[in-house]
Amino acid sequence: MTPDLYDQDFVTWAEQQAKAIRRAAAERVNTSEPIDWENVAEEIESLGKEQLHRLDSAYVVLLHHLLKWQFQPRRRSRSWKLTITEQRRRVRKVMSSNPGLRPRQDELFLSAYADACKLAAAETGLALAAFPESPPFSRPQAEDDGFLPG
């Protein structure tokens, strides 16, 4: 583990630190002050999970607006396009500082799609069944600044 990992991949750093703390607790490392090892490990781990939630949230909002763009072409607005642009920026930002999330990206994208469909149905008044079961565009397309569906 390199000291730069904290800056290069926070999620991986947090996961590694939580494991190291749990190992130290299991080995009963002596310290001059008592340490609540398990809760310290959980707190560090939760910091990494926040990045996962940030990515999930960005995907939900991005997909929500891409679905509205595709399924309500007459209602397209500058605001929707700005939201799509902003969420793409957020995805890139989370991924640039957390490359350890790459193996989970497709899974998060698909999970976010289900939530985005529910939001799009509620906002547009369209039935949930109006939206395909699987995303009508790929993750790379959704993340591409040049892509707008339909």
Image (cartoon, helix red, strand yellow):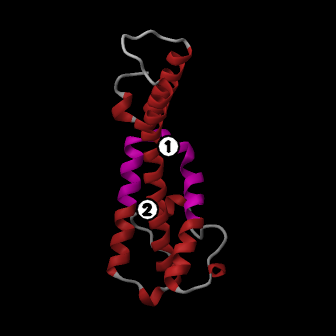
Q: Residues within 10 Å of mark 2 (few under 14, many from 20)?
A: few
Segment colored magenta: 88-113
* Dot 1: element: helix
Q: Residue at x 53, y 80 (%)?
A: 122
Position of 131 with respect to 69 (left or right) is: right
- The residue lying toward the viewer, choosing from 67 and 30, is 30
* Dot 2: element: loop
Q: Residue at x 49, y 64 (%)?
A: 60
Q: In the rendering, at what x and y percent does residue 55 appear?
A: 45, 53
Q: CA distance from mark 1 to mark 2?
A: 18 Å
Q: In the rendering, at what x and y percent does residue 3 appear?
A: 35, 23
Q: Amino acid at mark 1?
A: Leu
Q: Which residue is mark 2?
A: 144
- The residue lying toward the viewer, choosing from 13 and 143, is 13
Q: Quadrant of residue 138?
A: bottom right
Q: Which residue is mark 1?
A: 101
Q: Closer to the observer: label 1 or label 2? A: 1
Q: In the rendering, at what x and y percent does residue 129 appear?
A: 66, 80
Sooner in the amino-acid sequence: mark 1 or mark 2: 1
